Structures are given as C-alpha cells and as structure tokens.
Image (cartoon, rainbow, N blue to C red):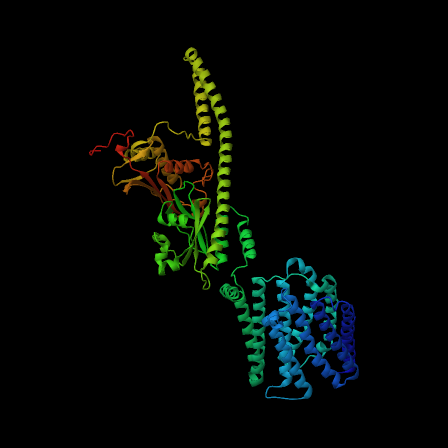
Amino acid sequence: MDSKMAMVAAWSYGMAGFLAAFLMLYLASGWRTGGRSRAMFLAVAISAVWGMLGLAFALTQQGVFLAGSLLTDALRFGGWSLFLLILIKPESTEAEPWSRRLGWLGGMAMLLTVAGFGSQALVVFGIDFPVPTQRAALFVSLAMSVFGLLLIEQLFRKVSPDFRWSIKPLCLGLGGAFLFDLYLYSDALLFNRVDVDAFSIRGFAHALGLPLVALAAVRSHDWKRRLVMSQRAALQSVTLLIVGVYLLFMASAGYYVRFFGGEWGRAVQMALLFAALLVLVALTFSGSMRARLRVQVGKHFFSYRYDYREEWLRFTQTLSAQGGFSAMGQHVVRGLADMVESPGGALWLKDPSGRFFAQAACWNTPISAATEDDGSPLCNFLLDSGWVINLEEYRSLPRRYDRLDLPSWLVEVPNAWLVVPLTTGNELIAFVVLATARTRIDVNWEVNDLLKTAARQAGAFLGQMQASEALLEVRKFDSFNRMSAFVVHDLKNIIAQLSLMLKNAERHRDNPEFQKDMLMTVEHSVERMRQLMMQLREGATPLDGPRGIDLADVMRRIQNAKSGQGRDVELNIEERLVARGHEDRVERVIGHLVQNALDATDPDGRVWVRLARQGTNALVEVGDTGHGMSPEFVRERLFKPFQTTKPTGMGIGAYESFQYVHELGGKLSVDSAVDVGTQVSLLLPLFDAGSGAKSARPPKESE
C-alpha cells in the first residue's frame, strides 16, 4: 500500500474507530438496562477495536495490527449478528436456553463467526491446505455479508409497523455496511485479488452507518417492542437466503471454470455468469415457483398456512377495485383464485329471473354458454351443505358427496378443480369454478374455511351490486316515465287540433281551401305521431289471463307483414303447436325479434324462423346472417333496458320481450357472433287444455 492510500486508510479506519468509541460511551450508561443494549454495546465495542487496529496498521504498516484487524473483523460480525438475532427473536422467558431462543439463525451465525475467525487465523499464521486459505477466507467473508443482509431484511419485515420508525436507521446503517462488504469480497473472489482502493475506504463505509445506528439507539430505549412474525417476512428471508447461496455457488463455479479453463476460461466464465443471472430472473418471475415456495414456507415454518390479516386485506382490496358489474365478477374470481394459487376461474351468477345460473365473468378461462337451473342437484347441494366441492376428491371418493350428480358441462370444463358457493343469507347467489392450482395444495379444513368465509363476503358484495343495478334501472324507468308525460302532452295537442278540424268539417266540406288545409293538418299530425311513437312504446299488460295461441298462424301473419315491406322471411314449421300466452304480446315479441333480424341483415342476406317441439315447450328460432353481436354485449347489455346497438333505438323491446317470456315460464337465449349472424331461441310453454284457461280454437288438420 503506497503512502497516499495509507493516509486514506488511516482517516477511514480512524473515523470508524472514534465514532464507534463515542457510541460505546453513550451506550455504557445503559449497560444494565437490558439484554438488547448490552448486545449492542458489545458489537460497538468490537467495532471500535477493529477501527483502531485498522488505523494502527495504516500508520505503521506492521503485520501484527493487520492480523488483529482481520481477527477482530470476524468477531465484529458475530457481535452484530447476536444483536440482530436478539431483536428478531420475540420476547421469551429468561429460563429458556439461548440455543432455543436464537434458533437455526443463531446456529448459522455462530458457524459463520467461527469459520471466519478460523480462516483469518490460518491466513495470519500462513497455514495452507489444498484449498488456498486466502480464498477460503474471502469466501467466508462474502457469506457473512450475505447472512448479515438476510438478518437485516428479516428484522425489517418482521417488526411491527409502529416500530419501523425506530428500527429503520439501524437497518439502513448496518445494511449499507454489509452491502459494501458484499461488493468488496465478490470483486475479490471474481478477480482473485483484493481491491486496494475499496479496502482503504471500507472504514468510511462503516463509519457512515454508525450515526444511523446511534439514531436508532436514541429512538429505541432498550428496544422494548414486540416483534411479529409474518409469512411474507419468512418468504422474503428464505428467498433472499436461496438467492445468496445460489450467487455464491455460481461465483465459485465461475472462478474454477476460469482457473481450469485455459484460454477459454474467461469466455466460459462470462457465459456461465450470464446464464446464471438469466435463470435467476426467470425463476424470480415464475408464478409456479413462487407458489411452490409460498406453500413450502407455510407448511414448514408456521402452524397455520395463511397470514389471515394479509389475505383478508388483499381480498377486500381486490373486491373494492373500480369497475362495472362484469369487472366485479372478475375481481371475485381472481380474489378467490389467489388464495389457493389457482391461475384462473369463472363465475356463474343467478339470472335476474332467478330461474338459472349463467356465466357472468371469467378470468384466464374460456367463455362458456352453459347454464345451470336453480333447482338442479348441484345448486341444491351447494346451498344445503355450503361445501367447497373438490372435483379431484369427487372423482376418487364420490361417496363423500352423496346426493350429488354433477352436470355434464361442469365435468367437461378443462382443469376444473374447486366449486365455491357464494351465498347471501339463505340464498345461493352464484358459484365460482376454479382451475387447478399451479402447485400441489392439500385442500384441508383451513383452505375450506378460508374459501367459504371469503365467498360469503363476495356474495354480499355481489348482492349489493345487483341491488344497485336494480335501483339504477328503476331510476331509468322513472326518467322514461317523465319523458312519457311530455309525449302525452304533445298527443293532447294533436288530438285537440284534429277535434277542431272535425268540428269545422261539416260546415266547410265543400270548400277546396279547407280540404287542402285539412289534408296538410292530417299529414302533419301523422308525422308528429310517428315521431312520438319512435320515442315511446306502449307496454300495457293485458287484463285477461294467458290463452292458447296457434304459433303457426302468428308466424305466417308476421311473414306476410314483412313481405309487404319488401323483405322475405323463410318459414319452417315442423309441427303446429299451441303455446300459452297473450296472442298480441307473443306476436309482438316474435315480430320484434324478426324485425331486429331484418334490421341487422343486408337485403341479400337470409332471415329465417323455425317452429318445432322441444320437450314440453314450443321452440321458436329466429336466425339471420347479419352483423351479429359480441359475447360481451349479449352477456352484459342485451336484455337490459336502454341498451341497444341501433343508433335510433331505446333498448326497450328486447328487455320487454325477455321479461314477458320469463313471466310465461319460458326462456330466451341468444347465440351470436360479429359479422356471422345471430340465432335467438325462444322457448314457450305449450298450452294445456285441461288447465281451465280459455283455449283458442284448435287448428284443423287441413290447415
């Protein structure tokens, strides 16, 4: 070391020694106040001795001072490790042995301290083995730096939030010192020589951290605070330890590859280090690897698998994210999936009519058109038992799920794993189907209880969202009614104008001017009424009960009416059927569907209507080759009021048709694709002549 660097080293280590001595004097007054202050006093005292020995070596260049500095450096690590371990360990009884109080971390700290002291002693006395002792000492010093960073990270993660203000300066000060040592010894191992410049200013790096340590000592009187252990802290600590061991191993492998590689050694070393970093980054961003590590930490370090506070905060935050009703469903699926490391799932929500469940949201799973009736065995089992159905267990032990018959569509769902019921009160509002987890998870009582509790909260959220949607629809109808008042006012004016014209017609029937004015008035009134009808549609409910309706006659009348408008509708009547309902309203529903198909189809396209029997229902299919609709529009907007794809429509027709069909006990479903076409399937209950309702005249065979 030349004279200039010796002067830098003298100032560097001298500053570290004197600052540590002043801090030692401050802590001396608290020697008897508690074990934590004593441990800190011991670590600071050793640091002061280490700094003074470094100063003496820089000034005299005597080997004895260098030897003392190297040996004291290992003891200094042991002192700071002991202090950090005492802070990390929760409060325990004084009678408990130190080996149990410090745990495996304490054993590793003691092993590294002994190894560091021994390796430095071998270097000092010049004892060599097949492995160079200088390189072994550098390797142990690097391991001590990594372990020190691990202790600091674990301390900061495990400490209670109200104590972080006090502990933060300590973590910054010691963390900076250990980080500098990590750089120094990594560089020495990679290039097989110690950087003299970095070694000379090492004292400055440690001296800069001492004021922060002193600030932490002032803030934390005897460090008497409770420390809490969380799964995240354990996971972060284990991850950091694995990464440190991995980097140490790859650094050693790189060195020996370079040493024995001859001319290709440096190139192979760089390739090996690059591959190691690439593998580390890939594993860091691997969801499956994180899931396996989280499961292993929860299984082997904790009596309970979950950190319930963290899980509940995360799930509540997920449910509270902004978005519409469909986004809310996706948030529910994602929140439940994250609890069991599932990569995807889908939500089946009860239809507003309350008769069946349909897919309302999905996350990383395909869209499904399958529906499940409200009174099906699956829904009854979910409601009565409240169980989370494990499909893997169902396949191996079906007797545990007695009375349960899974629907075919659920069996065919790819990677289906868990079926989680969502209830509100005594009502099943939805259920979630989760995909198989990224890693193997034992679905025990803890997982079931967590999922069921979270599902109840999600059910309450969905019920609240549905109530809000219903309230919004009521408000929209209120606005619609207010608009109707204006329309009625305009109709009254038109009627008054026409009444006045009729009153004068008897006296001026032969007057050509009056006749001309009358024609203009009638034309103007018709035009105004046409405009009003475009704004408002009559939706009065008939006073009489449902009757038998000949659907074949209804469909022929619609076909003739549309042909008069210049459009052709293909008609296919496989069987003449009589359905139950109100003839004018059923005709209006089918006519509305046909008109929508014609509006969405170019003149050269096809529009067809088919009538057939399906069980105890009449099936009316209305199809076209028109523009079609997106699955999102069909699922979220089609059957809601004031939602339409027409530029001049109000969206009342589809909503009215949907409501009326379900009032009759029927069902209306839509299969559509953009630029392909749409097919609407309308199921109407067949008319039972023995029910007592007034029947229409049954059709003759000749008809």
- Judge whether residue 674 can be spotted in this image: no
For residue 25, side relative to residue 291 (left or right): right
Residue at the far left: name it. 702
Front-lying residue, 564 or 348: 348
Position of residue 5 measured from the top left corner of the image (x, y, whole percent): 76, 79
- 379 or 569, nearer to the observer: 379
**Residue displayed at 71% across by 78% down:** 199
| Viewer-proximal residue among 518 and 272 | 272
Classify residue 175 by image quadrant.
Answer: bottom right
Residue 585 horizontal/vertical position (percent): 36, 32
Taking depth in this image into account, of 315 and 426 the one nearest to the observer is 426
Q: Quadrant of the C terminus?
A: top left
Which quadrant: the N terminus?
Answer: bottom right
Residue 159 horizontal side relative to residue 278, left or right: right
Residue 281 versus residue 422 in the image, above or below: below
In the image, is residue 527 above or below residue 350? Answer: above
Figure label count: 0
Q: Is residue 10 above or below residue 579?
A: below
> What residue occupies the far top of the structure in this picture?
507
Tell me if residue 345 can be seen: yes
Residue 532 placed where, x, y %?
46, 28
Where does the image place residue 156, in percent across and percent down from the top left?
Answer: 64, 64
Q: Residue at x 50, y 66 (%)?
A: 296
